[in-house]
Amino acid sequence: MKTLISLKSTIFVIFGGTGDLNLRKLAPALYNLYADGYMPEKFAIIGTARKELDDQKYRDLILEGVNSFSRTGKAVKEKWSKFTDNVHYTPVDVSAPKTFEGLRDKIEAFKTEFGKDTQVIYYLAVAPDLFPLIAKCISDYKLAGDEDTCRIVIEKPFGRDLDTARELNQLLTSIFTEKQIYRIDHYLGKETVQNIMAFRFANSFLEPLWNRTYIDHIQISVTEQLGVGDRGGYYEGAGALRDMIQNHLLQLLCLIGMETPINFDADEIRNKKVDVLKAMRAFGPEDIRLSTVRGQYTKGWVEGKEVPGYRHETGVAPDSNTETFAAIKFFVDNWRWQGIPFYVRTGKRLFQTSSLITIQFKDVPHHIFPSAVTEHWQQNRLIISIQPEMSIRLQVQGKRPGLDMVLNPVDMVFDYKGTYTSDTPEAYETLLLDAMTGDQTQFMRADQVESAWELLMPVINAWESKKSISFPNYTADSWGPEDAEALIARDGFHWFTLPLNKD
């Protein structure tokens, strides 16, 4: 099959090869990359797990995942047949390190077949407590390779606090160089998220406006209608702050807040992101009291069905102190953003599944129109919608058609669905291709991860040390606790939401 780009021969090893992440995301992404011509001419995918499977049973297993979860629908028979010629399975049990010998033998056999420049990518699609064990086994069995031909991809969560993140970084950098370590955050692979940089730095009219002189405040809101489902056990040890804000939302904030990079080099871009994190105002006890809100959902009705409260979900303690909602007001103390609030919120069992970044501009300095014609006046907004729709819209004031001068808000919209006919690749397709080409731009560096943890540790420690007496404090299918609205209303603003899609 003809490939669209030149890639080194690649061996892709997936730890957790029979797990949910691989079946739902990785296998469909790799198949779609192959179907679209974005895999190397010579490649091998080796799934590993404790189960005893042969190659054919493993291929049948991941076919179920592709047929169920691929953006392109069911696999095309001819393409699937050729793709799975490159898919293999090797049992590996982390608790029995000797099993790594079989993996090593299989990797060496493919290297001999493909050539000495073959690159090996290890993807750790496993529980976080297995990251150190797998990394040590890779080292012990001489599987780490050199920095030009070996990479390791680590899923979130990267640590559960600052100390564990530092410990994991120290272990990984004792085995691999930073150039080899790819800390993946799938949010950064989303098409609209990647377009933030293009939109900001490829359009000259934005830069003069992108600062405290013209911007009133910024909102970053990622809300989910779903509850924790069968992830209650995991979520009990995480919560909204660790699960979403420490990684996804702070990375979005960095893209909005960063200074203009001098080029598109991965480390230059990541330097600018780290600068934002280091400029963010630290939280003292009074800041935590006034600038943070936590919540936990109780039972309610969603789309006509009664749903349980968080404390009644599987794997959740009946007196759980874990937050399923978090809202925080951040400040970036530098020349560009001094005094401008960044409001961030995320939560489960909320009214709508949505990911929005809203930049609200300051009002005009002087109103020349009489109040009678400006009844529906609102400040200009730039809204970047990541989901459910992918769009960038600029809300401005315009004259309503007619003989009278009446103003109302109108939207200037760039809508992916209406502009492009081709399918948008899934985030994992983008990031897996980046890992194969060696592009670390969308992957977090060690200092990014540690700076994000350092910023949030005072809030995490305060929330964990003091049990909330108000939990549960918001109903399923609401917009969260009342205190979250008060957090932003005290400054004269309100949370922005897009109307539900009527299509």
Image: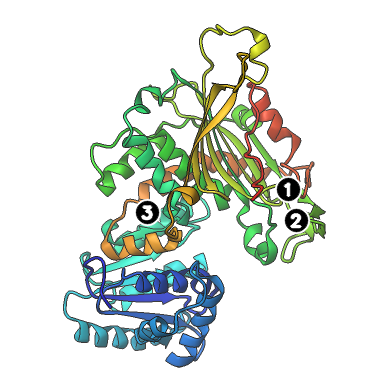
**The N terminus appears in which quarter of the rendering?**
bottom left
Would you say residue 175 is visible in this rendering? Answer: no
Residue 200: percent from left, percent from top = 37, 35
Above or below for 174 versus 215 = below
Residue 12 in percent (x, y) is at 34, 75
Can residue 67 be seen in this snapshot? yes
Residue at 43% x, 91% y: name it: 55
x 21%, y 82%: residue: 114
Q: Amino acid at mark 3?
A: Phe
Residue at image location 24% in from the left, 65% down from the top:
5
Cα separation between marks 3 and 1: 31 Å
Farthest residue in the left direction? 116
Above or below, 106 relative to 427: below
User: Is tag 3's residue or tag 1's residue first in the polypeptide sequence?
Assistant: 1
Q: Which mark is residue 443?
A: 3
The first of marks 2 and 1 along the sequence is: 1
Front-most of residues 497 and 97? 497
Q: Which residue is mark 2?
A: 310
Q: How many marks?
A: 3
Which residue in the structure is indicated by mark 1? 296
